[in-house]
Amino acid sequence: MAQQIIFYVLAVIITVFSILAVTSKQIIRSATYLLFVLLGTAGLYLLLGYNYLFAVQIAVYAGGIMVLFIFAILLTNKPGENVKTELPIRRIVAGLTSLAGLAFCGHIIYWNVKKISVLTEMADITPQQLGRMMMGTDKYQYLLPFEMISILLLACIVGAIMVARKR
Amino acid sequence: MQYTILILVLPLLSFIFLGLMDSKFKPKTAGLIGTIVLGIITALSYYTAFEYFTMYKVEGVYQKVIPFEMEWLRFTDLLSIKLGILIDAISVMMLVVISTVSFMVNLYSLSYMDGEKGFQRYYAFLSLFTFSMLGLVVATNIFQMYIFWELVGVSSFLLIGFYYSKPSAVAAAKKAFIVTRFADMFFLIGILVLSFYTKTFDFGVLTGENPIVFAAGAGATFMGFSVLSWAMALIFIGGAGKSAMFPLQIWLPDAMEGPTPVSALIHAATMVVAGVFLVARLFPVYYFQTPEVLHGIAYVGAFTALFAAVIACVQTDIKRVLAFSTISQIAFMMVALGVSGYEGHEGTGYMASMFHLFTHAMFKALLFLGAGSVIHAVHSNEMKDMGGLRKYMPITNWTFLIACLAIAGIPPFSGFFSKDEILAASFEFSPLIGWLMTFIAALTAFYMFRLYYNIFWGKDYAVKAAAHGHGHDDHGHGHTPHESPFAMAFPLVFLAAVTCVAGFIPFGEFVSATGADYHIHIDMKVAITSVVVALISISVATIMYRKPSTTPDKLAASFSGLFKAASNRFYIDEVYLFITRKIVFNSISRPIAWFDRHVIDATMDGFANTTQWVSIRIKSFQSGQIQQYAYVFLFGTLLIAALILIF
Amino acid sequence: MEFLTSFFSGPVPVEAYLAVSLIMFFAGVYGFLTRKSMLMILVSIELMLNAADINFVAFNRYLYPGQFEGFYFTLFTIAIAACETAVAIAIIINIYRNLTSVEVGNLDQMKE
């Protein structure tokens, strides 16, 4: 029962704030709403039992990326200044497109996904387990993607510095 | 005799070196390099000749030697192309001729071409030409010969078009190349047919003792003649193209647009005798397998000789007179080959042809170089701008006279001996041809002395220059003509000396159809007839041209039809133009061009235009607005998903 | 009332998670299509990425509870999102420095 209540609360939070995030007039508010959405998502991960993912979501998204966002917004916008309003026609068209896509995908999900509601019990994942999975080369072990991600991160660090530095 | 490879390699290296360095050198340096290389080659050729004629005689017969041969292209077991060096009597003789004349021309050009733009290029091309010509004569198989044959064509093209800023030179170069190339097409077909039936390219096999290779082609016939006859006739057409036989002679007079030393080298002494050499090389095949083709060669040669000699009598450009005289003399050699037998006394014609080739190369080069010397002095090719030059240019005068006497067939100059042998061979073949050739020999003597008197005698040069007034001063007519410098005079003197003594070479002991000794004996009847006829012709020329007189004009007026036709070279060029322009262009090329332009091009243009039209229409898709792209992407994705869902 | 209780009575079905992620995704699409600021477009992209993450995790948990493919996919997606954001923001700052604007409508010089 508690699980259901928590889920629906999170669902409402995510829905409302994601819509607010894309419609808000002030960009700094948008970023804040996004933060709430990300936190809500982290909550969903926790609800599903993936504690590690929850931690990563909080640390990387809410901690790292949001800081970057706010930093960038403060650099490029004067605080309090509104974002220019788009033409209403564009908003209507975009809204209709999104609703059409939503209806389409919802239709597919409603008619095609089996109604699974049984959550089988799952043992907690220990950090040791995760570490072994990430450090192996066998089946269901992910050393190669892990290393690739590390190289990608390095490239991003160098690239971001190169792109953003003053000439 | 392994060193003979150097004879080929050195000029090639010289060409590459001079060609790549081009203007890095001072003109003089480039010229000296070319000349020195040629000098070395000449020395090597002489040594080769010495060694060959002293050491490679087995039981009185000169052997064929192949000091070097390699496989170049191997297609199948049967079909492979080799490159090599074949040393036998005629190739050694050709080596000597080519390297001597080439060396003389190189030396002569040092002075003659001095100060010309592209001096280095000129020497590079000369080296290329020498390389290709030497490669042609030492070829071991007919395909190698063909390769060098084309190289010779190219270098001739380059040298004729040396003054490429002059439209007439460009046109002449193109004409020479296209006409000879046209003939070479037949040559190639002939080679292919011949080798298809004999399964070999090799000269050694084709001309060997055992003609078994011809058995396969013997039965096959095509339009009444055996395929072998066709093949040999086609090969002869290739030779006729290079050697300017009728009706393919039209390129040679125009080729005189090139620098005069080039004319001496290519269009008198070496390249134009390639056809004669080709026939001589394949002589056993012609003689034993296809005698009818050989007789055809004789008749073509005889007609060409007469035709060219008549034209030569009325030309006014001194180089053109020499060009037609060259055609006529080469035709003499062809006739000699055509009427020749094979063994012993029968082989007079073959030996005479080669002998004449040798002597003619020397004295015709001398004539051209002398003409060059004259042109250098008076800056004109036209007879009317000359006259009385003997006082100003004694060396040129004397050497030119020697050459004229030689070509007219006056003893003891070399031309007498070789021409006499040709006449003797012709008389043996048929009296008609014999008398015709004697008549042509008389004509030769006439037009050569007409040329000689017009240049060195006649009205005095100073008088003419005064009559022309100062209008010609820009062209250098104002100054007194002077004798040429040493570098130009030396080749004249050298070649004149050769011309004086070459007749006494016991040529028959070196070169004959079989390789065995052949003792030249002068047929007194023929000799006396030809000398008398020549002397009469010379006297006529002396009367007509030594002093300014009106006789030539009167004569021209009374034979005005013939005179006009001959001056226009019997309208052969016009016939060619008519055939190409009116018939080939209009009925074949134009429709093809129309088809190309309106169907093939139009289709391609249609593709291009459609692409362009569509591109312009869809250009606005590429707006740079990322959100627009996102719409497209999104709708595309939804569409594909919907399609998957439906089907 | 019964309708509401039926919501809370049984366990949460997988479609509920999918519905949440769907709304989140199309909110991101709407933002991507309407907003002019590049930063806002970036925010929309983050929303879409998150929606995808939720799908991965939900499917993993419901269908293959013993395995971890979806889990790791999400993990790596988060890392990649971080990379992408860092580079994108560097680019945006660079553009802002050159054009003093972060509006996408102005950025069409590279179309040709």
Image (spheres, coloured by chain):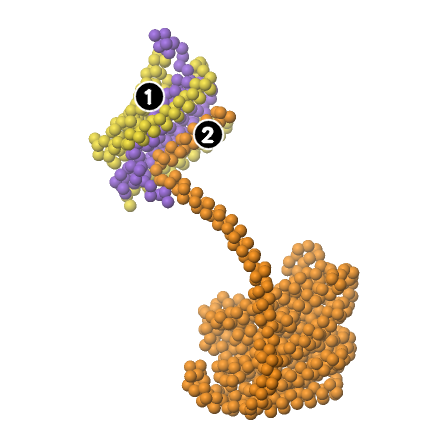
Question: Residue B194, relative to residue C109: is it above or below?
Answer: below
**C33 lies left or right of B490:** left
Residue B236 falls in which quadrant of the image? bottom right
Q: Quadrant of residue B138?
A: bottom right
Could you tell me which residue is drawn at 53 percent across and 77 percent down?
Answer: B260
Q: Residue at x 74, y 62 (%)?
A: B223
Residue located at (60% from left, 70% from top): B575
Chain in orange? Answer: B
Task: Give whichever of C103, B581 is nearer the camera.
Answer: B581
Q: Residue B231: horizontal and vertical position, in percent?
A: 71, 64
In the displayed structure, C68 sits above or below B595; it is above
Q: Which chain is yellow?
A: A
Task: Report in which chain the residue with disc 1 lies.
Answer: A
Shade representing chain C: purple
Which residue is tagged 1? Answer: A15
How far apart, in angstroms, are the residues tagged by discs 2 and 1? Answer: 27 Å
User: Where is residue B441 shown, x and y percent of the image?
Assistant: 67, 83
Q: Are marks 2 and 1 in contact (CB under 8 Å)?
A: no
Amino acid type of the residue that numbered disc 1 sits on in the rendered structure: Thr
Apparent side of residue B403 relative to residue A104 in the rendered image (left or right): right
Mark 1 neighbour class, 10 Å CA radius: few under 14, some 14 to 19, many 20 or more: many
Q: Identify the residue under disc 2.
A: B640
Q: Are marks 2 and 1 on the same chain?
A: no
Q: Is residue B412 visible?
A: no
User: What residue sits 72% from the left and 71% below the top?
Assistant: B296
- Going by the numbered disc 2, the residue's amino acid type is Ile
Q: Residue furthest top?
A: C2
Q: Nearer the viewer, residue B316 or B589?
A: B589
Residue B368 vs B457, above or below: the answer is above
